[in-house]
Image (spheres, helix red, strand yellow):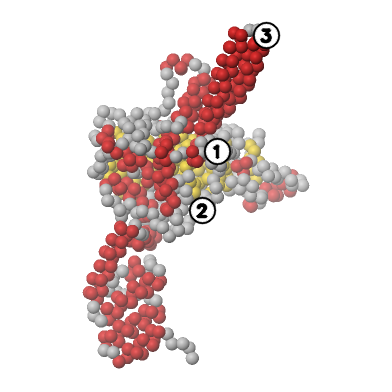
Amino acid sequence: MPPVSQPVLFCNAASTWPRQLQAAAAVWASCCSTGVAESSRASGAAAALQQQPKRTRQFRAIPAACLSALGLASTWRWVASRSRRQRRRDCHIARGATTVEVRQEVANAALAASPSSPRFDWDKQWYPVSPISYLDTLRPTAVQIMGKRFAVWRHADGSWSCFDDMCPHRHAPLSTGKLCEDGTLACRYHGWRFSADGACVQVPMATSAAASGRACSLSRTRASSFPTQVTGGLLWIWPDASPEAWADSAAAVPAAVPELADADWTFQLQPLSYESLVENCLDPSHAPFLHEGYAGQGLEVQSPNNAVPMERYELKGSLKPSGFLVEHSPYTKSTQVAECVRDFTAPSLVDASVNFPNGFKFRAVLYFVPVGPCETRVIFHFPGYEPRLPKWAWRLPMSVQRLWLDVRHARFVVGDVGYWRFNDQDRIAMAGQDRTRFKEGVQPQAAIDLALTPSDKGVAVFQRWLREWAGGGPFRGGRRNAPLQGPQPAGPEDAPRWRLHCGHCPRCRRVLRLVDRLQRWSRTGSAAALAAAAAAGLSGHPGGGVVGLASAAALRWASQSAERGRALFFRSDVVIQTEEVYSL
């Protein structure tokens, strides 16, 4: 005899109860045995309940159905509304995600149910991967976007190709390959050669030309290629491998800034999430507090005493798959009469500008390209703040002018004050956010529900765009697994400055080579000067000995200075203390 369930036993025991109680007991047993929430009509939340786990739907449906059977549907509606209010209060207090998740799931379900709603597809977009000046024209370069590895390389006519960084033969990285004189790319592992469109054109180990041709004609020997273009001084990649990728990319326009085609772009590979970096750029009110003591781009020294509460931060127009535009009131005393605009063009561009009544304009153009859940390619430029040489230096040879600009750039980037301190201030704060953003079971703070001040509105709008149009982000919803470690320049493992910027920057690498040469020359010259001083002393020429000792000391000082300068390129987080980054 099969076992009798508890709901059935309960109904048998309730057979002597009044009619209304018997009806409620029957409904309770039916809900427990079937787990169906359709019997709950009094709550009016069937669509929302369908988005919740089965056990939650089951037990929320029980009291609603029982009270409906007893004729107390209005009582259940009052209890349910009170429960919803309490859950919202709990969400605000504990920063939980109950109402946020329900709202997100309902919005996503509504968008999915409407085929006319154009959803944002992270793969079918143009992404800027690097300034052209940062790319090596003599060998392939490895790049990574959203966990996908690519190898980009330049042709003799100036065009670029992008392959999946995996040889179809034995999956060796094509980014370590060799550019051949005939314009093909050869894999280093077994020498297979590929043309610009990915077709295999030669298999060196084939026993004959005919055998090589047969192997090259197979579709599985073809390297996966992706659309590319050069616009605005940047190399752009369309990371979609579908058959429609080439037609889709031709119809789409990258978010380039044409007037900055010749700009001096700066590149970083930040160990931070895409979401944290974009939110930071849409949250200007943090500057007087996080960057206290910093005075960059000729602006006033940042200080909490100069902070001004933002009275207005509003969305202009509506949210679109292509992005949004926000305007806000000033947040420091120096910008009290300025017009502040921040334009987000999905998926990468944030164009922020502050227009002053006297005609002065500060502008920051930044691209954020997701590499991994906590790694992002950042390309930025501040128009009007390009390093310039004095007029008398224009008569110098171009090689000398370029060296001068390279040294100024490297000094600005690796100096203990200025740019790197500013960078560390942001990085330490955002790294703390990322430690919980992707942690299992921990939900990020939802600014759209916690917008206690108008200054939170920019982050709230971006989070809303992510939920309503972009599936929560480039690595949300199980779309991608955590990628492997991205391409890194060779250097010490604990050298963030080298891995974030200097190892990728051609200017910093040129200056580092110059510093290395100066260090070798000064060491050699110091030893030679000491030998000359000793010889002069032994030969009875004290004047020559003094000159030799002075020269040796000067060259020794130069060698030590070069060594200290070289160490700045590889400075480690171990020696960066909080008191060195933040003002007291």
* Viewer-nearest of discs 2 and 3: 3
Marks 2 and 3, how far apart at CA: 71 Å
Out of 398 and 167, give the one closest to the viewer. Answer: 398
The residue labelled by disc 3 is 539
Using residue 175 as the reference point, say whether residue 496 is left or right of it.
Answer: left
Q: Quadrant of the C terminus?
A: top left
Outermost residue to the right: 207
Residue 184 lies, in percent from the top left, at 64, 39
**Three-letter residue code for mark 1:** Trp
Are discs 1 and 2 less than 8 Å apart at CB? Answer: no
The tag on residue 482 is: 2
| Position in image of residue 120 (x %, y %) | 41, 52
Task: Specify whether 180 is left or right of 47.
Answer: right
First in sequence: mark 1 or mark 3? 1
Residue 519 seen: yes
The residue carrying mark 1 is 160
Q: Residue at x 53, y 32 (%)?
A: 567
Q: In the displayed structure, does residue 206 sit left or right of residue 116?
A: right
Say which element carries label 3: loop
Which sits in the foreground, 176 or 425? 425
For the residues marked 1 and 3, what is the alpha-carbon distance in whole angstroms? 66 Å
- Estimate the spatial distance between the alpha carbons at disc 1 and disc 2, rounded to whole Å: 28 Å
Discs 1/3, front: 3
| Residue type at tag 2 | Ala
Amino acid, disc 3 = Ser
Residue in the image at 63% along x and 20% along y: 527
Along the viewing direction, whichever of 493 and 154 lies nearer the viewer: 493
| Mark 2 or 3, nearer chain start | 2
Q: Residues within 10 Å of mark 1 (few under 14, many from 20)?
A: some
Q: Quick check: marks 2 and 3 in contact, CB under 8 Å? A: no
- The part of the image, by quadrant, that contains residue 337 is top left
